[in-house]
Amino acid sequence: NAGVTQTPKFQVLKTGQSMTLQCAQDMNHEYMSWYRQDPGMGLRLIHYSVGAGITDQGEVPNGYNVSRSTTEDFPLRLLSAAPSQTSVYFCASSYSTSGTQYFGPGTRLTVL
Amino acid sequence: KQEVTQIPAALSVPEGENLVLNCSFTDSAIYNLQWFRQDPGKGLTSLLLIQSSQREQTSGRLNASLDKSSGRSTLYIAASQPGDSATYLCAGHMEYGNKLVFGAGTILRVKS
């Protein structure tokens, strides 16, 4: 199993541009989440999904959209990038809400 | 407010020493506790998950305990090695939604 994969590894955007961060898992996990990690702020939940077609907001959802059309994929869309969205983004998945959460390698995003 | 606190923020020890990392939480809605390791510029690697019905979990030289009544968890590392140098994060699983609440981490350096 590849586990949780994320693309791209690095990305530089200009303010106002849009892009999609990709996340996929091959473990048949129902639960997937997106976190951002910032110095001094730790990891914070952006959006999460409890199954295909079901998503909900986390702690810091503004400026981000998600959808879950398949069990395997959970893309994160930045609608109009802002410098405040410069961060490292991690995708995670788990079999259940109480089970071990597995994280991807992250995407390092810089918005100029 | 959900808070997870980790003490100490940084720790430097000589190789071979046994050490304890501390994690405390204030929210009674945290029911499971997961410990992660993060190497610089990398993703999160799950070390141990302690479910609310358990008091401790062991994996190799690692032992983690959970006391929900006092809101505390500890990660014990036996016979530390330079390869253990990393940031260690604890995260509480929330009862509602698919959410982890993270501590700020303990930066561990094991000197050879």
Image: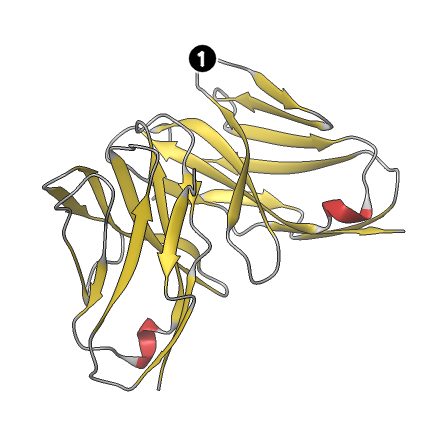
Report whether B2 appears left or right of B109. left
User: Farthest top residue?
Assistant: B53
User: Farthest left residue?
Assistant: A53
Disc 1 sits on a residue from what chain? Answer: B
Q: Looking at the image, which residue is at 26% across and 85% down? A: A15
Figure check: B30 above or below A52: above
Figure check: B101 above or below B56: below
| Residue A75, picture quadrant | bottom left
Can I make out residue A25 in this image? yes
Report whether A16 appears left or right of B18. left
Which corner quadrant holds the N terminus of chain B? top left
Can I make out residue B2 in this image? no
| Residue A8, picture quadrant | bottom left
* Residue A48 picture location, percent across and down: 23, 45
* Residue A47 picture location, percent across and down: 23, 51
* Crowd tier of the residue under label 1, counting other residues whose Cα lies within 10 Å: few below 14, some 14–19, many 20 or above: few
* Residue B72 picture location, percent across and down: 55, 29
Q: Which residue is mark 1?
A: B53
Mark 1 residue element: loop
Q: Amino acid at mark 1?
A: Ser
Q: Looking at the image, which residue is at 31% across and 53% down? A: A23
Report whether A38 appears left or right of B85. left
